[in-house]
Amino acid sequence: MTAKQWLDENNICEQTYYHWIKIIRQKTYEPAATSANTACVKTMRSEVAFAEIPLPAINPVSAGENGFRPDITIQTGSVLIGVSNTASDALLGKLLEVIGHAR
């Protein structure tokens, strides 16, 4: 399966995929290639392989391991956020700002 086929099958934007590939390469491969260990870094063409990482099922009704039971839950995509009535206005504002940027 090609990267393009996998992206299409999983509804992932190709630009987003290549953006993260660039970041990963900058953080891992490029520093290794420019260090004294250049003899250890070899460029090889290989096929892309993807592995599914299952996420545990979330039950929003039950209390969590620490006994927290949210007064309100916010779900966006596959992320579920539990919020207490005691959350400050500043925290709620920041939370909504982050959710808006994540879309």
Image (tube, helix red, strand yellow):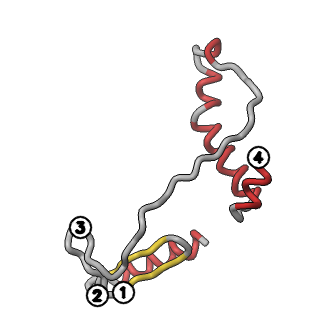
Q: Earlier in the sequence, mark 4 or mark 2?
A: 4
The mark found on residue 1 in the picture is: 4
Q: Amino acid at mark 2?
A: Asn
Q: Earlier in the sequence, mark 4 or mark 3?
A: 4
Image coordinates for residue 7, horizontal then vertical, percent: 73, 57
Give the image quarter of residue 95.
bottom left
Query: Viewed as shown, does residue 41 lie left or right of 96?
Result: right
Q: Of helix, strand and loop, which one carries label 2? A: loop
Query: Going 59% across and 19% down the picture, which residue do you hit?
Result: 35
Instruction: Sort mark 3 into few (<14), some (14-19) or many (20+) by Cα contacts within 10 Å.
Output: few
Quarter of the image for the C terminus: give it.
bottom right
Query: Viewed as shown, does residue 17 lie left or right of 40?
Result: right
Image coordinates for residue 24, horizontal then vertical, percent: 61, 42
Q: Which residue is mark 1?
A: 72
Q: CA distance from mark 1 to mark 2?
A: 8 Å
Q: Earlier in the sequence, mark 1 or mark 2?
A: 1
Q: Are marks 3 and 1 in contact (CB under 8 Å)?
A: no
Query: Going 29% across and 79% down the picture, which residue do you hit?
Result: 62
Q: Is residue 32 above or below residue 85?
A: above
Marks 1, 2: nearer the viewer: 1
Marks 2, 3: nearer the viewer: 3
Q: CA distance from mark 3 to mark 1?
A: 17 Å
Q: Are marks 1 and 2 in contact (CB under 8 Å)?
A: yes
Q: Amino acid at mark 3?
A: Glu
Marks 4, 1: nearer the viewer: 4
Q: Which residue is mark 2?
A: 85
Query: Going 64% across and 23% down the picture, which residue do you hit?
Result: 33
